[in-house]
Every structure is written in C-alpha cells, then in structure tokens.
Image (cartoon, helix red, strand yellow):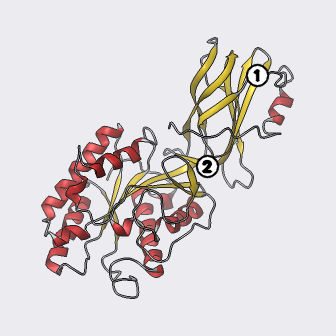
Amino acid sequence: MHIRTTHIGLWLGLGVAWLAADTSLQAQDTKASLALTSPVSCQVFQRDRTDQASILIEGTVSDKADVIEAMASLAPGAKRGRPVKWVGITTKGQAVSGKFTGRLTLPAGGWYQVTVRARSGSRIIAEHAVDKVGIGEVFVTAGQSNSANFGNPQQKATDDRVVYFNGKAFVPAQDPIPGGCGGGGSPWALLGDRIAASQQVPVCFRSASLNWTEVKAWLPPDTELYKNLSSCVQVFGKDGVRAVLWHQGESDTLVSTSAETYCERIKIITEALNKDAGYQVPWLVAQASFHPGSQPPQQDLVAKGQQLLWSKKICFQGPNTDDLLGAEYRHDGVHFNQKGLENHAHRWFDALGHAFKWKSGLINTKNP
C-alpha cells in the first residue's frame, strides 16, 4: 500500500536486545535518514489461513547501503504475536540507494513494533521504527444508509485494536466511519470489538457506502460507486481484504427490482471486482429489503434475490436485518438505534464466524 506518512522518529531501545547479541554491528554514526511509506502506524494487514502475513516494507534511504533489514517485536500490551529477528529484505549483494522495497513475514496475528534499518558493512547508517503494525482482519463495507452513518447514536470501539482506514491513515474506530455518507453511527466499531475479542487480532474497516442507492448504481465498469468500491479494495493489495460486507437493497424495493435481476447485478459486480483486485474477494450479502415506502411483495422480491446469491454460492450469507423493525430497533422507522446497531453487529459477527469457521480455529479463504 502506498500511503504517505510523516517521519515517526526512532524508538529508542527497540531492537537493542538484537544489537547486543550481534557485537559485529556498530551503532548508527552517520546523518543518513530512512523514511517509510509502508508500513505506517496502526496499519492492519490481512492474515492468511495460517494466521500470518507478508507485509510490504517500502521507503527511501538517503545514503548508499549494502542491505535493508527489518525486525518485529511485540507491541506493548500485545496479547498475541511472535517476534521476528533481523532479516534482510533486499537482494543480498545489491547496493541500495534511494527507494527500496521488500517484504517481511510476520508469523502470527497481533500488534507488532516494526523496525527497519539500512546497513553498510558493519555500520548501521539509518533506522526507522513504526509503533504499531497489525496482522489481523480487514473488511470493506458497502451498500446504503444502514451500512453507512445513519444510525443513532454514534459508536466507538472499546478495543484499541479496532481501526478505520480513512484513505490516508489508520485511525481509532469512532463514528462516523470515514468514506461512508452521513454523520451518525454504524455497526462496524461494535463488530470490530466482537472480532478482536474473539480472534485476539487487530481489525480494520474501510467504508464504501452511499445513501439511497439501487444496486444498478454500483454496476461496473464506469459507475462512480463501483470505481470507488474497487479502489477501496485494491488499496490493500492482493489478498489484502478478508471480505466485502454488503448491506443494501432497500432502494431496490422502491423500484420493484426482481429477484433474478438483483442476483445477476451483484454477480456482475463481484466478478468485475475479482478481476480488478486480482484475486477472489469473498462477499457476505445481508438480507436487507425493508423500507417503509415499499410493500411486502416488493420487499420479498429483493430478499429472494439476496437469498439466490447464497443458494447459488455466489456470496456468503450475511445477517438478516428485515426483522429488526419498529421503534425497538429503528430510531426513525428506517435507520437503527442503539439496540438495532448492537443486533446488526452481533448478526454480522455470527455470519462471519459461520463463513470463515472462526469457531473451529480454521480460516476459510474460498468463496462459498
């Protein structure tokens, strides 16, 4: 991911244990500088089915170096993870000057402190540390208002492992979620708390939601909504997103979209996204068809379209929110209140656990 960040500065003491064990290295003694564009603070990388991830190490060094090395220690307070000692991330015997890129494999989910250094012979000429780098779960949320910021009240994650990505930086998960329209609350911070507590890993959400949209407004390749959705997925790199979480359909009941048409349109979107992203991106599609301005027969058509996606194994089954009705769950007849948001989040958690078999300790990375 190419995200610009300000220089964080050296974290004094990080890696001292490794240096003490390698007496052949000399401490940094030049005015060279090393800056990183990846990883950045609080960035979360999607883990694979073995619970590890190969993270992108990318940046620049101002002086010529023989090798760029990286290491990872557990972040303070981290409940999971396994440290990685210094390893070279650039080609051995090939001098480095200016931009460099490589990868570092982190072997387990959790928060890490990652340090990158440039070395010339036995001299460390520059070093840069990132305070928190996460291996965990990454989701892109999409759909209409109940996937965005129209709930009441706003929500905030209680677990500091839950973050939102705003397109430039990874920030604490506090509504309104960046990228989603509206200024209210969403279920995503609450869902993040549930996942973090269950899996003991960091969790990231990126929103691509817009209010009052029919599914046809998302069709590829030229609609602004599809291009935005594709961009939101691709910024995390290949295999960088666990799933797209889709909650949409209310507007389609107002125009009597048929079940077959709804299913086919989502299928077209998923296939285009897979091609653009370069991998099979799993989708979870919610049953979301209720709108007070439509009638039950119209709502049934859209709900059946969403169910077709499940039965045809185009998408995983998401939560059913059509029964969360009335003042008990919706603050304005359409959008969720506190109880509605809590139920929305809990049902997403159950759907994700079923889709990816978290309860059994396995991670299913294939589409249904």
Q: Which mark is residue 125?
A: 1
Q: Is residue 159 left or right of residue 117?
A: left
Residues at circles 1 and 2 in contact by the CB criterion of under 8 Å: no
Within 10 Å of disc 1 (Cα), the crowding (few <14, some 14-19, many 20+) is many
Q: Is residue 294 above or below residue 163?
A: below
Instruction: Judge by depth and name the residue closer to the eye, 64 or 181.
Output: 181
The answer to whether any part of residue 312 appears in the image is no
Q: Is residue 34 above or below residue 341?
A: above
What separation in Å lies between label 1 and label 2 (alpha carbons)?
A: 26 Å
Q: x%, y% of residue 106? A: 61, 39
Q: Residue furthest bottom?
A: 327
Q: Residue at x 56, y 56 (%)?
A: 163
**Dot 2 corresponds to which residue?**
42
Q: Residue at x 30, y 77 (%)?
A: 322
Q: Residue at x 14, y 78 (%)?
A: 297
Q: Number of callouts in the render? A: 2
Disc 1 element? strand
First in sequence: mark 1 or mark 2?
2
Instruction: Judge by depth and name the residue closer to the eye, 7 or 160.
Output: 7
Q: x%, y% of residue 34? A: 68, 28
The answer to whether any part of residue 261 appears in the image is yes
Q: x%, y% of residue 216? A: 20, 56
Q: Is residue 8 left or right of residue 27?
A: left
Q: x%, y% of residue 41? A: 63, 46
Q: Is residue 201 left or right of residue 302?
A: right
Disc 2 element? loop
